[in-house]
Image (cartoon, rainbow, N blue to C red):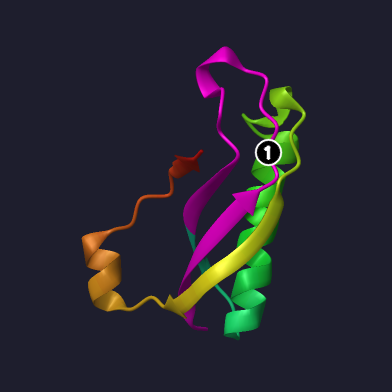
């Protein structure tokens, strides 16, 4: 089954945390295995949504609107290079 790198963008945040004042969105990457690119986008968005509802971000009560803005095949060279799954916050 193919592996995809999916860039997920979140928007519509209203963060009350003093350390995140002014943050209104984010971008993050997920690497997923799926039969098709559209399914990979769906899986990646589901993973990110789960993190915001049930994971470490859930304490903020935030449910961002998510969109897969880029989906591409993730090959052997990409795997060797690695890929960060952190968040980049946008003001």
Q: Is residue 53 above or below residue 77?
A: above
* Left or right: residue 11 compared with residue 71: right
Callout 1 crowding tier (Cα within 10 Å): few <14, some 14–19, many ≥20: some
Q: Is residue 71 magenta?
A: no
User: Which stretch did the figure color magenta?
Assistant: 1-29
Q: Nearest the camera: 63 or 55?
A: 63
Q: Position of residue 56 (x, y in %)?
A: 62, 29
Q: Is residue 12 magenta?
A: yes
Name the residue rendered at 66%, 78% in the picture: 39
Q: Which residue is mark 1?
A: 13
Number of marks in picture: 1
Name the residue rendered at 62%, 17% in the picture: 17
Q: Position of residue 89 (x, y in %)?
A: 48, 40
Q: Quadrant of residue 20?
A: top right
Q: Is residue 48 above or below residue 24?
A: below
Q: Is residue 21 above or below residue 41?
A: above
């Amino acid at each position: 089954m193919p592996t995809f790198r999916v860039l997920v963008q979140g928007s519509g945040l209203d963060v009350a945390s003093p350390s995140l004042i002014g943050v209104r969105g984010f971008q993050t990457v997920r690497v997923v295995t799926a039969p098709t690119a559209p399914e990979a986008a769906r899986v990646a968005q589901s993973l990110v949504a789960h993190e915001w509802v049930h994971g470490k971000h859930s304490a903020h009560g935030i449910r961002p609107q998510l969109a897969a803005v880029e989906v591409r095949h993730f090959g052997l060279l990409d795997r060797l290079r690695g890929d960060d799954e952190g968040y980049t916050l946008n003001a």
